[in-house]
Amino acid sequence: MAQKLKEWSRAWSLLIAMIAALSLPQLARAVDFNKPMTFTIQPQPLVAALIDFSRQAQVQVMSAGVDLKGHQAPGISGRYAIGKALDVLLAGSGLTYKAAGPNTVTIAVASPPSGNAVPQPEKPRPTSAK
């Protein structure tokens, strides 16, 4: 009898674990920048355009407000991959994006490519007269 009870206990534990695993949301994944979505975003300040983008793409967009200040988004209308839509909205702004976690995109100032920086000429040093 004790053996049967132990087997039933294991079976119920396994069943409960399986139900819990299946009822939890899918494991969090990075943003799929190739996923096509339909966008309708009017030309407007970039801050507002990214809020619209966030709602329509169902992703969270994070950025430093100071980086977005003064930029205009050209707007976008139609079916685009998420990454392509961001490319269009950020075009000419000097900003870039990257996945920052599950369903989260970070917008930041684009860094100059490493190794391709143009060397600056050395500034002449003042010489002292004797």
Image (cartoon, rainbow, N blue to C red):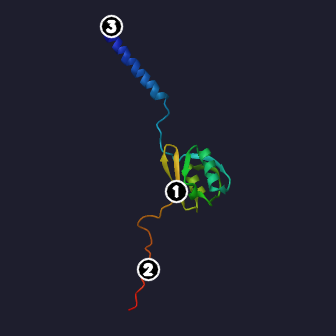
Dot 2: element: loop
Query: Which amino acid, mark 1?
Result: Ala
Mark 2, residue position: 123
Of the two numbered discs 2 and 1 in the rendering, the one whose residue sits closer to the viewer: 2
Query: Which amino acid, mark 2?
Result: Lys
Residue at 47 percent across and 64 percent down: it is 112
Q: Residues within 10 Å of mark 2 (few under 14, many from 20)?
A: few
Query: How far separated are the C-alphas under marks 3 and 1?
Result: 65 Å
Mark 3, residue position: 1
Residue 81 at x, y = what percent? 56, 49
**Residue 29 to residue 68: above or below:** above
Dot 3: element: loop
Query: Which amino acid, mark 3?
Result: Met
Q: Residues within 10 Å of mark 3 (few under 14, many from 20)?
A: few
Residue at 54 percent across and 59 percent down: it is 95
Q: Which mark is residue 108?
A: 1
